[in-house]
Image (cartoon, helix red, strand yellow):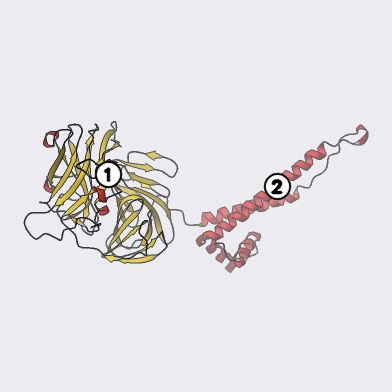
Amino acid sequence: MKPAPNLHELLLRHLDGRLDGEEKQRVEALLRDDPAARAFLREVAEQAVMFAELERSARGRQAELHSGNVAPGGGRSKILQLDFRGWVRAAAAAAVIMLLAALAIRALPPAEKGFLRITKVHGSSQYLGANGKVESVLEGGTVVGVGDTLETRTCDAWIELSLKDGLTMTVAGHSILRILDTEKRARRFKLSQGNLWVSPKAGQSSQSVSIQTPTITLEAAGAQFDLQTSSAETMLRVNEGTAFVRQLLDGSVVEVPAGHQVAASLSRKGLLTAVPQPQPINYWACDLWQVPEVKLGKWLPPSNSERARLGAEPLLWPVPGRDPVMLYAVALAAWKSTEHPVLLQSDSRLRIRGRTEKAQPVRFGFSAQKMQGVFAGKFEMDVKAEDLAPAGETWEVELPLSSFRPLNPKLSPSPDGLELTDLYALTVREDAGLEINHIELVPRQSGVALPAQRSKQE
């Protein structure tokens, strides 16, 4: 939207130097706070330069034509005296306008190119700079800014970022986060896929953040929330504060208070609705045929015994100071198969069914977050080839959660009491033909079990 006509006149009078002191202050504030005013000033400058160039070219062509005229009778050429004052004035006006525009831009507050700092890094990640620079190894202390993109490239990767006002953001495995720009109202980001946790610093006010996903745009100030998204679905849960969400499909807007969540899908019609976060469950069964979209893996044709088969995909894992390692992995998000938080307990077990075409160890892992809280790290364990069924045959393993090792004990030394966010299985260096058919979380045998929830389709 352009400034009103009276503002146009004010800007043009400013270029002519015909403003009083109060009007000058008004113009300075206008150029500082109104992008449309700055755009108008640039447009005028561009037009002035264009007209000056046309005038100069036209005069030049006339000069060439007249310089070729020969006087009758073989006399000497008559040189036409050209008047360059017109285009000189235009060029001078353009120069003045562009100079004033440059001064106006210089008077603006400097853009925060480095308002975001990487504080922690784990696993394989990638930095795509706004200037085209690509870095495959990230380190704590690296400063990123507008136009930069961060990507966590493996199942076990995560990045923690800190803003100047103390706000903390964390992205986990297979996530893509781009820093869009900074505005007076909010700092803007785009989460194309994956998981994001946002937490303000306790006792300190923070600027609003605006985050866009393939299905929604949200804005929040001083809120603690987590966001999980894919190419067609987004789940937002607000644990502290309030967020405002706009659905991209129809433009509907909803307020999401603390303790509530909202789900948006490109295939789900109707207005967005904020609902209370459901109670956690400690039994969860993931039938893969009910989960059409996964984080990593390829669908294989069903067999006589398995309705759904998810095969491993190759994944290059860069290792600092060494040659990269090839992984063959599958990964899926728990939120894709249930709307309930999945509670992990120290004496619960993961029951996983699958097969391999070659005898090879399999690494199993999962990531977790604090219940109604922030990212809490990843946990892994290896199962030897001899503990699985012979190559080509279906196996089923029960893995106690207490046997999983934390990749970063400082985040959480144990999965007990955490919420499951995603799971993965992989083989290292060799493609063993790994496939996963079914996953269950089986609760403790004693005590009171929470309500069971098999899937959100049931």
Q: Is residue 368 above or below residue 71?
A: below
- Tell me the residue that label 1 is attached to: 157
Q: Secondary structure at mark 1?
A: loop
Tag shown at residue 54: 2
Which residue is at the front of the view, 278 or 99? Answer: 278
Residue 233 shown left or right of residue 310 in the figure:
right
Closer to the camera in the image, 176 or 99 = 176
Question: Can you say which quadrant of the picture contains the N terminus?
Answer: bottom right
On screen, residue 322 above or below 126: above
**Which residue is depicted at the point 22% across and 33% down?**
432
Return the residue found at the far right: 73
> In the rendering, at what x and y percent does residue 371 appear?
20, 58
Q: Check disc 1: other Cα within 10 Å, few if <14, some if 14-19, many if 20+.
A: many
Q: Mark 2 near mark 1, Cβ–Cβ under 8 Å?
A: no
Where in the figure is residue 399, as x and y percent of width and height?
13, 45
Locate residue 362, reporting x and y percent.
Answer: 18, 37
Q: Looking at the picture, which amino acid does disc 1 mark?
A: Ala
